[in-house]
Image (cartoon, rainbow, N blue to C red):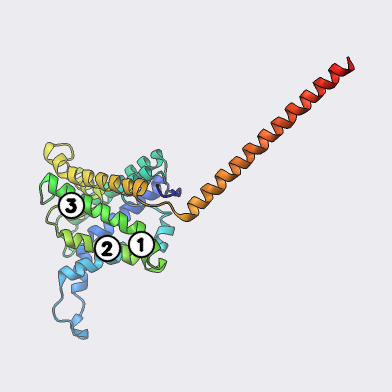
């Protein structure tokens, strides 16, 4: 039996656009953050070999941990910053289809604006963005099949972890654990096929800003990220609807609801029977009087 579904309040479209803009920009600027960190005097604390790759992963982890934190969630009014999350919430019935579609498009718009702003700024003022490589359209390293499967695996595993973690770990650790799990899946994928974006908005934005989002090559490049996210959503939806047991609290609530409904039905039947009996009694007394 499927688990019970809790409705989720989504952020207004304007807030989603702004939040997606900030999150996308922060992640695109990780290279700058890594470069600036490398300029610190690490030798003072005995670090002589600054590892750019480890610093890159650390900054991705910190950025996502902040985005997942209760503070940012409250400020952004629960913005998802990812159309894939809106798709999954819509499939699960946690938000309406209309709200999920609007939210997804708002998130994509925010990513397009962020990618476009940084593409312009890094080209016009490169000195202010040390260590940052020129932005370009995202293209998967693997074939359509392999990249799609990689994105599906990353999306599914992260969604499953996000669903199970609250029942296993303390609430205070969830933002860091969610961020760490995503980084771990991205490292495991190792950019061998798709780089595990788990967010087609970034990929779509890169092609829109670079001026080619409709050619056959662009569609072929974006397809694994869209299809992988969609398949990840569908796999999680299937697990939630058909494989996971229903919580005891939900079963109890349903049982109480059914019992109350039966009680109301019986009360109505008794009231109807009493009315029929009274009607028959009145009819009988009238006949006797006649």
Task: State yes or no: discs 2 and 1 in contact (Cβ < 8 Å).
Answer: yes
Which residue is at a point 41% across and 54% down the rendered structure image? 78
Please tell me whether mark 1 sits on a helix, a strand or a loop: helix
289 vs 197, left or right, is right
Q: Residue at x 49, y 51 (%)?
A: 251
Q: Is residue 120 visible?
A: no
Q: Which residue has dot 1 on it?
A: 165
Is residue 82 in view from this perspective?
Answer: yes
Q: Position of residue 284 (x, y in %)?
A: 82, 21
Q: Residues within 10 Å of mark 2 (few under 14, many from 20)?
A: some
Residue 150, label in figure: 3
**First in residue order: circle 2 vs circle 3:** 3
**Mark 2, secondary structure of its residue:** helix
Q: Nearer the viewer, residue 258 or 83?
A: 258
Point out the tag, 2 or 1, that comes first from the N-terminus: 1
Identify the residue under disc 2: 181
């Amino acid at each position: 039996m499927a688990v019970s579904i809790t409705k989720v309040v989504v952020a207004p479209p304007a807030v989603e656009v702004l939040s997606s803009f900030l999150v996308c920009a922060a992640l695109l600027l990780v290279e700058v953050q890594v470069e600036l960190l490398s300029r610190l005097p690490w030798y003072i604390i005995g670090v002589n070999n600054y590892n750019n790759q480890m610093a890159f992963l650390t900054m991705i982890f910190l950025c996502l941990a902040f985005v997942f934190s209760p503070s940012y969630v409250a400020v952004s009014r629960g913005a998802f910053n990812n159309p894939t999350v809106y798709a999954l919430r819509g499939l699960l019935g946690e938000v309406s289809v209309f709200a999920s579609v609007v939210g997804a498009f708002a998130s994509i718009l925010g990513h397009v604006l962020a990618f476009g702003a940084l593409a312009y700024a890094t080209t016009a003022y490169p000195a202010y963005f040390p260590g940052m490589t020129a932005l370009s359209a995202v293209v998967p390293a693997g074939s359509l099949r392999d990249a799609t499967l990689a994105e599906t695996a990353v999306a599914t595993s992260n969604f499953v972890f996000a669903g199970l973690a609250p029942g296993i770990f303390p609430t205070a650790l969830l933002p860091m654990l969610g961020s760490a799990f995503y980084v771990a899946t991205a490292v495991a994928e190792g950019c061998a096929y798709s780089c595990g974006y788990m967010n087609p908005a970034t990929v779509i934005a890169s092609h829109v800003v670079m001026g080619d989002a409709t050619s056959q090559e662009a569609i072929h490049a974006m397809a694994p990220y869209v299809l992988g996210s969609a398949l990840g959503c569908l796999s999680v939806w299937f697990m939630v609807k058909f494989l996971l047991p229903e919580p005891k609290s939900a079963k109890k609530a349903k049982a109480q609801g059914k019992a109350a409904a039966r009680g109301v039905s019986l009360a109505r039947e008794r009231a109807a029977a009493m009315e029929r009996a009274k009607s028959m009694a009145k009819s009988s007394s009238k006949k006797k009087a006649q």
